[in-house]
Image (tube, rainbow, N blue to C red):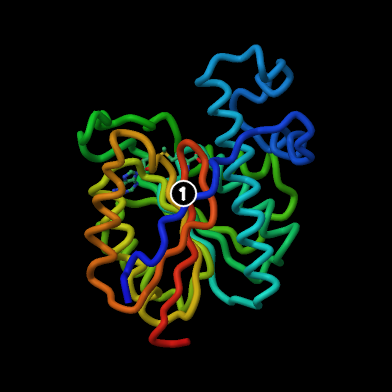
Amino acid sequence: MNNLNTFEVENNFKYNFNNKYKKEVQNLLIHHNDIFNQKYEELNDSWKSEIDHQIGRYIIQMKIFETIKNENIQGEILEFGTWQGQNLIFLVNLRNEILNDDYKVTGIDCFKGLPYEEDGWKEGQFKNTSKKKVLNNLKSKINNIKNVEVVEGYFIDKHVYEYTQQIENVSYVYFDSDLKTSTLESLNLVKKFFEKQKKIFIGFDDWGCKNYTLLSAFGKFIHTFSNISFKIIGKTDYTIFFEVINHNLT
Ligand SMILES: C[S@@+](CC[C@H](N)C(=O)[O-])C[C@H]1O[C@@H](n2cnc3c(N)ncnc32)[C@H](O)[C@@H]1O
């Protein structure tokens, strides 16, 4: 079987004016929620993309969580690259609404900014945060933060390795560390789940940025497997989401 069994992509998510999740997403935003009050058609392209991105990734992750629930997929929810916690807020909110707090959610970040200069990303970018800030942001938006953990460390740190390896199963992993090198480091931390689980979901932020450099990291990674398919299930201008099936176990 071809490792990448499908790359058919449906249209990118595009915001529509009657989107019923607009208010829900707006209420969860820690930055720029005022742009949601402006007329979409009057915004410039980068703000339009930002709205599509936030609502798009929220809705696609909602569909993923609904599938996890409907198919009774067990396992923790992980995010690599948390910065100030925007997507972690989305994940915990969706977990509380669709799943339940037995599903542990963890955000992992060094909180010191990008560790390497790479592909136009600057070392130290996104350092304006801390674990405390993420916890405060979470508490400001979410009532139930039970079974939510924020781990501070580089992906290559021993304690991060140990933390991820004691996890039994994952159901969803979101990679949002921008850099090809960091993305590969985090993919390697969750490699064992691709090998031992029938089905999991993964998502990548910044997929379409910087000339698709993440694609080469991902390509390198998936070629270490056989009989595992990666099917695209959702996309925005900046993100991409896959259903991962291990056919050795089906
Ligand atoms: C774009 S930000 C994350 C954005 C966040 N998920 C959101 O939704 O707003 C990227 C984060 O990845 C973290 N990061 C990148 N490489 C890392 C590494 N090797 N180890 C730990 N953290 C890393 C940076 O510290 C930064 O906070």
Quarter of the rendering containing residue 193: bottom left
Whole-percent x, y for residue 202 in the image:
46, 60
- What is the secondary structure assignment of the residue under circle 1? strand
Left-right relation of 171 to 70:
left
Answer above or below: position of 138 versus 67.
Answer: above
Q: Is residue 189 above or below residue 198?
A: above
Dot 1 crowding, Cα within 10 Å, few <14, some 14–19, many 20+: many
Q: Quadrant of ligand 1?
A: top left
Residue sitting at x 59%, y 33%: 52
Asked if residue 82 lies left or right of residue 29, the reply is: left
Quadrant where the N terminus sits is bottom left
Q: Quadrant of residue 2?
A: bottom left
Q: Position of residue 136 (x, y in %)?
A: 60, 40
Front position in the image: 71 or 127:
71
Please state if 152 lies on the left or on the right of 68 as rendered: left
Q: Nearer the viewer, residue 25 or 7?
A: 7
Rendered image quadrant of residue 62: bottom right
Kind of residue sitting beneath label 1: Ile
Residue under numbered circle 1: 240
Is residue 157 positioned above or below 34 on the image?
below
